[in-house]
Amino acid sequence: MKKPSPVPWLSRLALYLLLVTLLGGCDLFAGSEQQSILETQLEINVQQTLRAEEAEQLSRSAEETLQAQQATLTARVKEGTQAPPAVDFAAQTANAQQATQAAEQTSRAVEAAVTPQPPQADFQTWMQSAKIVVYEDITNDTTEYRYVEKTLQGMGLTFKWDGSAKGWFKNDLLGGAPGGGPWDLVILAVEVRGEVSGEYFDYVNEALNRGSSVIIEAWHLDEISRGTVSTILTNCGVGVSDYIPRTGTTFDVVVWPLAGASSHPLLTEPNSGLSFTKARDKWIPSGDLGDLLHLTGSGDAQLLMGTDATETSRNGVLAVCMGGQLVLQTFSSHSFPYDVMQPLWENMITFALKTRFSR
C-alpha cells in the first residue's frame, strides 16, 4: 500500500512561524510564564517533526538508490542468461581448415629442413656450362702441347682461351664472364717467366673476391713475391722461402705428393696414383726451376706436393687454400711430359670447379 506523502518540511516551518506569531499575542488568554512554556513545547514539537521529515527523506533516498542497484543487477543477470548468439558453423569450418593447412605446411617445412635435399643440379651437368677463362702463354713454341687447353678439350668443357694475349685476359677479368657475372674458373698458367706480374695479380685477386675459383701456375714468385701478388700469398697463408736450384740433371725437378696429403681430393679425383719422378729437361738450361713455399699461418693453406715427401709445412710446390678456392702451383708444368701433368691438371680443374659449384 502506498504511504501518504508527508507534508513538506517547508510547509511545517511556515506553520511553526505562524504559530509563533499567534502566540505573540496570547496575553489575553495566559500569563507570560505559561506563554514561554507553550512556545518551548511548540518549538520542540516542530524540531522533532523536522528531524522526522529529514530522516524520512534520507530513507527514501537510500531506498531509491537500492532500487536502482537492484535494477542494474537484474539487467546484468538477464544479459547473462540470454541465449548465446547464433554460431557461424561455416566460418568455424573454414577457420579449422585453414589451421589444418597451416599445420601441414609447417610440418612439411620442418621435414624439408631435416631431410637431405638433392643438389639443384648435377655437378657433371653444371660443369659443362661453367664459365672458364684461361691465360696460357706457351703459344710461340709450336713443338709443345698447350697442357691446359688440351686438358680442357679432353674434358669436353667450353672455355675462353686468351693464350698469351695479356690485354684480352685483363679485359676478361675486369669485365667478368658473359652476362656480367663472375667467372666460375680463372686459370693463369705462366710458363714464360716474367711475362705476367704487377697489376694482373690485382685483377686475379679481384676475381677471388667475387667468388671465382682460381688456379695459378707461376714459378717466378721469388722474383715478384714482394709486389702485388703478396696480397694473394698472405690471404692464402704461404710465403716464398727459396727456389728449386738447378744442378744440371732432370732429377732437380722431381717432386712428391706429401704423405699427409696423399688422400686429398685434388690428388685423387678423378685421377689417383699420381707420380712426378719422370721429369724432362725442358727448362734446365734456363735457371731455377720453381719456387718453394712454406706455411705462414695467416691463412688455411695446405701443402700437397713438395721436394721432400716428409715435409708438411715447407719446401712445397703445390698448395690449396681459401677453402679450396685457390690452387697454387710453383713449378712449371712443362718440366714434365703431358701424360704426367694431364692427370694433375684434370684433377685441379675438377677440384676448383667443385669448390665453385658448392658455394
Image (cartoon, rainbow, N blue to C red):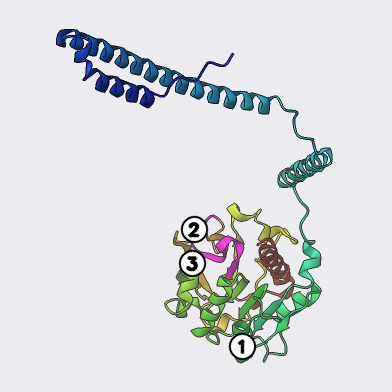
The residue type indicated by label 3 comes to Asn
Q: Is residue 344 visible?
A: yes
Relative image position of residue 272 (x, y in whole percent): 73, 59
Relative image position of residue 273 (x, y in whole percent): 72, 58
State which tag comes first along the sequence, 1 or 3: 1
Indicate which label's residue lies in the foreground, 1 or 3.
Answer: 1
> Label 3, on which residue?
235
Q: Residue furthest left?
A: 32
* Rendered residue at 71%/82% (across/down): 178
Q: Judge by depth and name the residue closer to the eye, 175 or 344.
A: 175
- Asked whether residue 316 is drawn in magenta, I would say yes
Do residues under tags 1 and 3 come within 8 Å of each other at their CB atoms?
A: no
Indicate which label's residue lies in the foreground, 3 or 2.
Answer: 3
> Label 2, on which residue?
313
Residues drawn in magenta: 310-328
Q: Residue furthest front?
A: 28
For the residue labelled by badge 3, is the local secondary structure a helix, a strand or a loop? helix
Q: Judge by depth and name the residue closer to the eye, 5 or 339.
A: 5
Do residues under tags 2 and 1 come within 8 Å of each other at their CB atoms?
A: no
State which tag comes first along the sequence, 2 or 1: 1
Indicate which label's residue lies in the foreground, 2 or 1.
Answer: 1
Q: Quadrant of the C terminus?
A: bottom right
The residue type indicated by label 1 comes to Asn
Relative image position of residue 236 (x, y in whole percent): 51, 65
Q: Judge by depth and name the residue closer to the eye, 348 or 358.
A: 358
Image vertical order of residue 142 relative to residue 264, above or below: below
- Asked whether residue 207 is drawn in magenta, I would say no
The residue type indicated by label 2 comes to Ser
> Label 1, on which residue?
171
Give the Cα distance between marks 3 and 2: 16 Å
